[in-house]
Structure formats: structure tokens, C-alpha cells
Image (cartoon, rainbow, N blue to C red):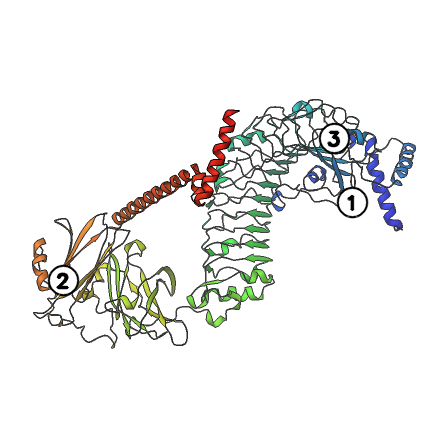
Amino acid sequence: MMPEFGRMLLALTLMIIASISNVTSENVTTISSATTQLSPLTTEFYSSSSSSISPSSELPPNDLQTEATATSTIPTQTNYSSTSSSKMLNKKLIKIAETPWECPNITKGTVECSCDFPHTLRCTGDRTALQAISQHLKSSREGIISLLDVTVTGISTLPARFLENVALHGLVVSTGELRRVNENAFVALARPLQALGLPNNLLESIPTAALAHLNGLDRLDLSRNKLKTLEAHSFRGLSSLTYLDLCDNLLSQLSPQAFGSLKQLRSLKMRGNRLSVSALSALRGLKNLEELDLSSNLLIGPLGPNLLPLMPRMRFLTVSENELINVQQGALMGLRNLTVLILSHNQIDVLEDHSFKHLSTLTRLDLASNRIVAVSSSSLAHLEKLMTLDLTHNFLRSFTADLVVPLTSLQDLRLDDNDITMVSNDVPTSKLKLKRLSLADNPLNCDCTLLDFANWLSNSSLDDEDKLSAICATPPALENGILTQVSPGSLLCGEPTPPMMTKVPLAGAQLTLKEFHYDKIAGINLLWNVAPCTESYTCDTLIVYEAIGDTEVETESSPLHCDSRLMRDPCSLPVAIPASMNLQAGHSYRYCVVLLVPSDFDDISLGLGCSDVIMLDENQSRWDEVTDKIHFHDSIPSTIANTINFNNQDRITGVHVNVSNQGFLQVDISLSSNVELKSSGCELSVVVFAGESALHRKKLNCTLAFDTMSGLVPGRYKVCASLDDIVDHNGFEINSDRGRSRCVEVQAFRQNFEIIIMAVAVASCALFVTIVFIVRSLVKKLRHPQIQTQCFLPAQEFEITHKAHYIKLLATTKV
């Protein structure tokens, strides 16, 4: 048996529900019915008008922005005229409450109904379903159904008086085809509706005439229709309306008087329409509006002071998924009581100083998925009550005090997926009141500047998920390390770096930088010495670090491709850095090369070599001018000296040319092994010809026998190198017999690319012709299937079959 308290509570609930029939629409206050526990769609019609409305951003898009209360609160009479009438009513309610509630059993025709919650009837069917449901409910006990949710097909017009003498609190009708509502559709209801939903239909205009009879309507849902405009007085007669949902329509024009009759409106949803900034002036006059959703519209431009008219009670504003470009000083000056502002998924890149000076009541600010690079303390001034700040998916470079110092009440800070590399030392970690801090997907540079922050983060009261979100990206030794798990001794700054020629024996192969050359147009040429060069290796990566003060930051990382087995001199590794990498003159850089070397113990081990920090200065970049800056290691071959000379047998053994798709041409010249370094007059002449014209001439020192040229256009080129000072085109050909000159012809990339395209086109045409020939052959075979089949039969059977058919044809002809 049910406990006595439970029986009393159930009886009281049913008594209140049954009393609806004796309540007039003028004396009611609409509140949510928690006893019915409605579905997300129909819950929207039963939210409390006296309880606060939660921000739309906190709930799913189609949910009502209210939470169900723990007790049943159905429209009740505000007062009674006499004690005697109250006693009579109580006796009637007790009698009704003692009758157990049962779900109506409607099985007529194609109608299917169910009651997932008490006093809530959900039905599906075809166009005859409405009549069957109406007839059954008219014969049912009063108060048995409070909400009717009907999904029917085959109805384009909602007929007149279709629920005659049926008492309902809320009604939802979805057909997917409904285009019109008869003006007398709701006039015959036994009790005025307080909640009406017509979602998921094809309505192109507001059914003003039909709605005018529902002067007690509190909630209206017209979402997911085809509404394009709101005319003046579209909601005539709905002065009691507090909730209006117009989401996912085609609204682009709003009459200035469209909402003129909705003086009590508190929640307006217009997400997913086509509204521009100029259309927002129609909201003027909604003095009681508390919640407004304008997300996914066509709002373009700045978020300025006058974007929205004066709405003194506005608390929740959503303007996400638009094209707002910045937040101006004193934005939204007419919303002085705003507590939640959602500006995510816009194109905001600037927060002007004192942007929120009229919004000091904000407790939550969402700026996620914008283009914000930096935030100043003046931008976030006046937000002393802000508790949640979301800046995920932006382009912040650092976590500075400006983000937290003005926000004295901040508890939740979200900085995921930015470009944060450092945490400023001025961040007052000891004063932070954060309960949540997320730094996931940021390239943190874990050096000594993070010591204080790492210590605070480890000892904070944040949950483990937030503590583990800070991941190191640099230096390479700490890459992918969790900041709170990195030992303080590993967070270092300003370590002494090895000199340029210091060898780093990470594997059998050791790299030392021999030569460095910088040209503003051609870029940088590096020549590395690999020792011992008897080991095979392949190139892996080129890494460039920029020296900024006492720290070094990785600026470039690009793959290198080489194989020592295919190189004529595996002891020397030339590396070219094109000017397109945008390394800046006057800045200092360190260059590192990583090789992959076979190992006896592992499949692959690393060979690493790094240069000293070198400043890019074109005036000091030539080999003969930087000898004081580049120090050679003792292991460099003794054949390299200060002077060079060749004997009579000096020869050019090869000219190697590479052409890139970016218009760069790199020349590398090989000399015979009997070159003696005796005279400083040893020079190489390099000329690039286009036809008979010389496009590029350059003198090279024999110790630096490679060059880079940029700005090539598609075409064929002839590259010649000579040990003699010959500039005539024919001179190269004459001296080539003696080996002192050599020429090669190359072709620019784009022309090769066109040849490839032509080859592919020809191959495609050939394939197409082959396919057509095969298809035609198959078609011909299908036209004579009998002959093809009979070819496999014995000769005697073929003759018999042929005669049989012939005799049958003769007989048919005679008949």
C-alpha cells in the first residue's frame, strides 16, 4: 500500500489538475507542470513564467530555457470569493483525485496513441486522426488530459473546430505539410489554450486570425516553418504571450510594429533566420524581454552601442554564428542588466578599450571561435562580476595578467586551442580564484619562465583534467611533456650553446658546419661536413631556431631529402634555404640538420648537427669575409686552405642543376680530385643562358662551388660552368673538350608539368577509345545470341534445331 504521505501528495496533484476547468484565463499564472515531465519539444509550453529563464546557450538548441521544478504548478485560481465555494470545490477535487488516472485507449483507424507521462497524450496517424482523437477526448473524464501532442500526415489546412468541446492546457500539431490554419480552428475548445505549438510545418505567414481567439495564450512555438516576414500586428490579441519561438524560419524583414502587442514577452527565439542589423529596430518596445537568441543570422559589422534598442530587463543574449567583426567601446549600452553574453563563432579580432563599460553585471562572456590575438586590461575593464570567460579557438599568443587582473570574480577561464607559448611572470597566481583553467592545444615553451606557473598549477585545487591540459611543445627535449609532471630542473633558460664546429655524436655520423653563405634574393646556402662519411645515411629534417634574447624559438621545420648512397661526395652535404622561408636580415638564427643513420642496435638512430647562432647580414655572408666568424674543427680535410690553384690537368667533372616549382635554380659544380689549392685566383664562371642570351652570370670561389638563382619563368635553360674567364656562348663549347668547361640543359617545372598533363590526356583518350571498342564488341555479340550459342553445339544438333524451327514456321504460315 502506498504510504500515507504519497497518497496525500498524489491526491493534491490531481485535485489541482482537475481544477483547471473552473479557472478563467484572466486569473491564471502559467507555470511548468513537473508532474507531467514533458518531452523536450512540448516542455517549452510549460515553463514557469515566475521562475528565472536559463541562458539558451547552456541548453540544447530546441530545449526550453527553463528547468522543471520539483512540484506540480498548474494554473490555479488566485483567490476565491467565499469560504463556502472553496469547500465545495475541495470536495469535488477530492472525489476526482480518488479516481486512479489511466491513459486513454484510442485504437480507431490508423491512430496510435501513448502516454509516456501522466496527463500527456501523444498520437500519430493520418488525416482522420484528429477527428478520432477529438471524439474520444470529448467522451473522457474532464481533466484526464492536459497536453495533446499530435503528429499527423496528409493535412495542409488545420480545419475549423477540430477539437470542439475538448479541454486542454497545451496543444502541439505537426504535420510537415501544414500551410494554413482556419481562423476558427481554436474557437470551440472547452478551455482557452495556454500553450500552442505548430512546429515543423510549411506556414509562410503568421495565422493571425486563428491566434486572435487565444487571448490567454502564454507560449507559442512556430519554429521550423517557412515564415519570411512579420507584418504589423501579426500577433494581435496575444497580449499575455511571454514566450515566442520563431527559430529556423526564413525571416528577413520585420515590421516596426511586429511585436507591438507583445508587451509581456519575456523570451524571444529567432535563431537560424536571415535577419540583418537593420531589422533589429523592430525589437523596440519589448521592455520586459529577458532572453533573446539571434544566433545564425546575417548580422554583419561591429557590435556597437546601439546594435539593440533599450531593453532594461534583458539578461541573456545570444549573437553567435554571425559576422560581427569587433566589439566597440560601450557596446550594447541599452542592456545594463545583461548577465550572459554569447558572441562565439563570429569574426571578432579586436576588443576596444572599455568595450563592456555598460555591461558590468555580466557573469558569463563567451568569445570562443573568433580571431582575437590579444586582450588588454582595459578591454575587460568593468567586468568585476564576470565568473566565466571562454576564449577557446582564438589566436592568443600569451597568457598575461591582462586576462585575469580586471576580473576579480573569475572562476572559469577557458583558453584551449590558441597560440599561447608563454605565461607572463606578472600573472598573479597567488590571487587567482579559478576553479577551472583549460590550456589544451597550446604550443607552450617550457622554460624557466614557467617555473612559478607550473608550481601553482601543480598545487592548485583544479581538477586533474585541467592540470593535465598544459602540454609542452618546445624545447624539443620536453615536447609533449605535461607541464605539471616536468621536473623544475628541466625548465631552463639561457643554457650555453656549443660553438659552430662542435660535433654532436648522437649516432655514428657527426655533422659540422663548414660554409655559410647568405644572399637576400637567393637565400641561404649551408655546407655541412659528415664524418665518418663511410656510413650510409638519409636526410630527415632542417630546423631553424631564432635567438630572441636569452631564449631560442623554433621558427621553421621542413623535411630534407637525400641519400648518401646516391651522392657523389657523401662527406659534404649542401643544404639550401630559399628566400621564400622569410628569414629576416638582422635577426640571429641557429640551423640544425637531422640525419637518419642505420644502427647496430636499433633500426634507426639520429645524427644531429647545429650551427652557432649566426646573424643574417648580407655584407658579411660571403665566405672570404666571414672566416673570422666560422671556426673550423681539426677534423676538416687539410686540402682546404687560404689559397687555391689548379695545374694544367684541372677539370670540371660535373655540373648538377635542380629546378624547383617555385622558380629557383640551384647549381652545384664538381671539380677533379687533383685540384691543388695554391693560388687565390681560382674562380669559377657560371652563366645561365636562355637561347643565345645570358640571363645570369656569377663568379664563384672554387671552395664554394654552388649557387642559387631565383625568378625563373617556364622554359628551357642552358647552365654552363668554366674554370676560364670565358663569357662567349661558343667559348664554353670550345673548352668543354678540355674539361675546363661543362654545360647542361634543364627545363622549368611548369613546362614539364604541361608535358605530364598532355601525356595523361593522351593516355586517357587511348583508354576511352579502348573502352568504346570493347563495349561495341559486346553489343554486337548480344545482337546475335543464337548464332553465338549454336557455335558450341555439335553439327548434327544444330541442323535438327534449325529444321524444327523451319517446320514450325511453315505450319504457322499455312494457318
Q: Secondary structure at mark 2?
A: strand
Q: Which residue is mark 3?
A: 193
Quick check: 514 above or below 284?
A: below
Q: Nearer the viewer, mark 3 or mark 2?
A: 2
**Other residues around mark 2 within 10 Å, as few (<14) / some (14–19) / many (≥20):** many
Indicate which disc, 2 or 1, sits on the residue closer to the N terminus.
1
Residue drawn where x is 80% and y is 39% of the image: 103
Indicate which disc, 3 or 2, sits on the residue closer to the N terminus.
3
Determine the CA span between mark 3 and mark 2: 97 Å
Quick check: 262 above or below 329?
A: above
Asked if marks 3 and 2 touch (Cβ < 8 Å), the reply is no
Determine the CA span between mark 1 and mark 3: 22 Å
Asked if marks 2 and 1 touch (Cβ < 8 Å), the reply is no
**Other residues around mark 1 within 10 Å, as few (<14) / some (14–19) / many (≥20):** few
Q: Front-most of 264 and 670?
A: 670
**Other residues around mark 3 within 10 Å, as few (<14) / some (14–19) / many (≥20):** many
- The disc labelled 1 sits on which kind of residue? Thr
Q: Which residue is mark 2?
A: 684
Q: Position of residue 434 (x, y in %)?
A: 59, 57
Give the side of residue 214 with respect to residue 671, left or right: right
Rendered image quadrant of residue 113:
top right
Indicate which disc, 1 or 3, sits on the residue closer to the N terminus.
1
In the drawing, what numbered circle is on residue 71?
1
- The disc labelled 2 sits on which kind of residue? Leu
Quick check: 149 above or below 505?
A: above
- The disc labelled 3 sits on which kind of residue? Leu
Determine the CA span between mark 2 and mark 1: 95 Å
Q: Nearer the viewer, mark 1 or mark 3?
A: 3
Rendered image quadrant of residue 163:
top right
